[in-house]
Amino acid sequence: MANKVRVVVTGIGLATPIGIGVEEYWKAAVAGISGIQRISHFDPSGLPSQMAGAVRDEGKTEELQAWVGLGPEESRVALFGLATARMACDAARWDAWYRSDRVGVFFGTTGERLELRRMAEVAYRSRANNGGQINASGYVREYCSSFTGQSILRLFPQYVTARIASRYRITGPSCTIQTACTSSAQAIGEALRAIQRGAVDAAIAGGSEFIVSPIEVQLFCLLGALSRRNNDPERASRPFDAQRDGFVLGEGAGVMVLERLDKALERGVYQRARDLHADE
């Protein structure tokens, strides 16, 4: 269509296995650094696959929590989701430059996952409160009672989406996408189409997923879906190779600010991005 609305990216935020932030990520990518290594945040010994592309924050967790205003009880899904959203919005020079109902949030995630240790704690408490027996109803009652007030909202996949919308006072369309590995890509596509059809002028779009956990890794090992190239983790992910023996789990977060070209030109952010690219 000749009159299709042009959409541009004016801000990006990244948290990846090879770097947190666009600059750190890009330097590592250009240098050919692999983010796939032996799992270090839990002991994978005895598992058929013992490697993954895990985000290593190198002690930045507390710094990031303070930066985005989250407490230590928040999941990494929420922490890096909000952190990359702020990175993208800061890069786009976000302010009250649109009516809040002309901005949308489109985010891909399946939400917080309980760790094995936490699940076991709930199970033992439910047994103590249920005559020494563990059953489904007792577990659910104990599980629900451990959350009060706003904390229970963290269990819902749309939690991060809602936090981003609240942080930036966005009252336009807010959507959480759950389509497995395509969630974040679809979220960006939905945001693009929303801008093109005139539903919004700008959108925060992307996703956050952290699944390198004992439960997730063991589940995929049981399926026989993961590579067993433990002695050569940096070359284990080889989707188009004849010697491919499975995929490698990865995690991370990435957020973009998308906006109409004419609006970005009005604000000067698109020209600024082009000038920066030209200087390189």
Image (cartoon, helix red, strand yellow):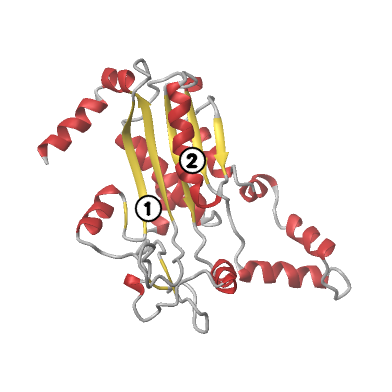
| Tag 1: amino acid | Ala
Few, some or many C-alpha atoms within 10 Å of disc 2 (few <14, some 14-19, many ≥20)? many
- For this view, does 135 lie left or right of residue 234? right
Q: Residue furthest left?
A: 279
Percent coordinates x, y for residue 80 in the rendering: 44, 51
| C-beta proximity under 8 Å, tags 2 and 1 | no
Percent coordinates x, y for residue 225 in the rendering: 52, 69
Front one among 33 and 147? 33
Q: Which residue lies furthest to the front in this view?
A: 242
Query: Which one is earlier in the sequence, the residue at label 2 or at label 1?
Result: 1
Q: In this view, does 53 lie above or below 6?
A: below
Report helix, strand or loop for mark 1. strand
Q: The C terminus lies in which quarter of the figure? A: top left
Residue at screen point 55% across, 51% down: 180
Q: Mark 2 points at which residue?
A: 186
Number of on-image labels: 2
Percent coordinates x, y for residue 186 in the rendering: 48, 40
Residue 15 circle label: 1
Q: The N terminus lies in which quarter of the figure? A: top left
Q: Which one is in front in this view, the residue at disc 2 or the one at disc 1? A: 2
| Tag 2: amino acid | Gln
Front one among 62 and 251? 251
Front one among 208 and 160? 208
Q: How far apart are marks 2 and 1 (CA)?
A: 19 Å
Residue at screen point 45% across, 35% down: 189
Percent coordinates x, y for residue 165 in the rendering: 51, 33
Q: Quadrant of the rendered structure where residue 10 is?
A: top left
Residue 198 circle label: none
Q: Quadrant of the rendered structure where residue 234 is?
A: bottom left
Few, some or many C-alpha atoms within 10 Å of disc 1 (few <14, some 14-19, many ≥20)? many
Residue at screen point 41% across, 41% down: 85
- For this view, does 276 lie left or right of residue 232? left
